[in-house]
Amino acid sequence: MVYSDGAKSKLGFHIVGTTFDPKDSAFLNKSEVLTRFNPYTVDTLAFTQFYVRQIDQVNVGGTMVDVVDTVYIQYFNITGIKPGGYSLQSNPGVTYRYGTPSTDKLSYKSLLNSAAVKTDTLLLTKAYADSVVYENGTPKSFFGRTFASTPNVVSKSTNGADGTTTLFAFSVVYQPMVKAALGDTGMAYDGSKVFKKYNMYGVRLASLDGHDQLITSNNKINNMFVTNFQVRYGQTLFGFLKSYLPGTVFGNTIFFPSFVHITTPNLSNKNVVAGLTGVQVYPNPVASNSSADVVFDLTAPSAVKAVVTDLNGRVVSTSASVNCIAGQNALSVSTQGLSKGIYMVTVESNLGRMSSKLTVN
């Protein structure tokens, strides 16, 4: 990359990603801060700027074909995340904490990690590209398009004594169809000619000079991470960092502009020893003089029944009590004789009670 003053920089990031901790209030835009006792699901991962595209077609065997690049997004819970720590010579008594995907599960050939709980493969066409503004053939600025994926990754554990059990991480690997060679100029902001154009991912990293992200808490870990050319093939850097470098080890903090949206059924700060969650009714709406299934989850075995009430709180039907197992269960409720309208179905158990609306057509 050639900057506006003519300075050159070799770019060598092969993997970029972030480890996210919902227990850190600095990374939440809500007043509630989750604890290690709060189960949660990452339902959306959004990027504000995703992909710079400078070439749309390439000559393959004498035929011009559309360029289709590939991005792999991998998602991790604590089963595939390796928490770590390091100390600085300037402050030897303090351990700074970080988390990255497991180093021993990374393939140095594909750059994919087998510890991921899910991998999304995106084929990047022109529809994914950011808008690029050119001046005399030189890119001057970018307007990002929002891209969102739907991981639906559930935190592995919420009751463990170790505060790292609720961590979530994602990594991004970009494989361009048109490969760059060492020494090629990818982008030039000083007006010099770019002889070979490339489509690029990863130029959207942001850094902040004079700012650090050193984390000392055992219960709060948030950091961006990269795999650069120094650890590309599993070499060890600084004597202990292998395959991934946390953003906390750089002189200026590196950020990966992204947003993680999470949902939790429980904002309690108490240990979830046993409980009733996830009550849903299918089908909904349901026909009169028919039946519907009430699906729910139990954290322990319990006797359960379903009570149907109208909006005035009057009980209109009650199912038989059934001994249910830990995990997902279902009860059948009858709509026989019910008028059209909205009702409440309440699942009652020794572990608690939870309600859901039921519409009868």
Image: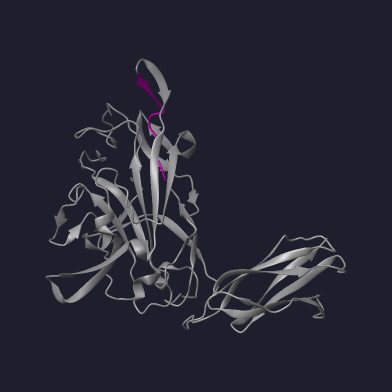
Classify the position of the C terminus by image quarter.
bottom right
Examine the structure image and report whether residue 82 is included in the region drawn in magenta.
no
Out of 318 and 23, give the one closest to the viewer: 318
- Return the x and y of residue 134 as percentages of the image width and height: 39, 33
Q: Is residue 213 above or below residue 183?
A: below
- Magenta stretch holds residue 51: yes
Identify the coloring. one colour
In the image, taking residue 259 as reference, residue 202 lies left or right, namely left
**Numbered marks: total:** 0
Q: Residue 26: give x, y in percent of width and height.
A: 40, 70
Q: Position of residue 29 (x, y in %)?
A: 48, 68
Q: Viewed as shown, does residue 205 lie left or right of 281? A: left
Can the viewer see residue 130?
no
Q: Is residue 305 left or right of residue 336?
A: left
| Residue displayed at 50% across by 58% down | 152
Residue 206 drawn above or below residue 360: above
Q: Residue at x 44, y 37 (%)?
A: 124
Q: Main secondary structure of the magenta part?
A: loop
Residue in view at x 47 percent, y 53 percent: 46
Q: Position of residue 186 (x, y in %)?
A: 28, 35
Q: For the N terminus, which image quadrant? A: top left
Which contiguous range is marked in magenta? 50-60
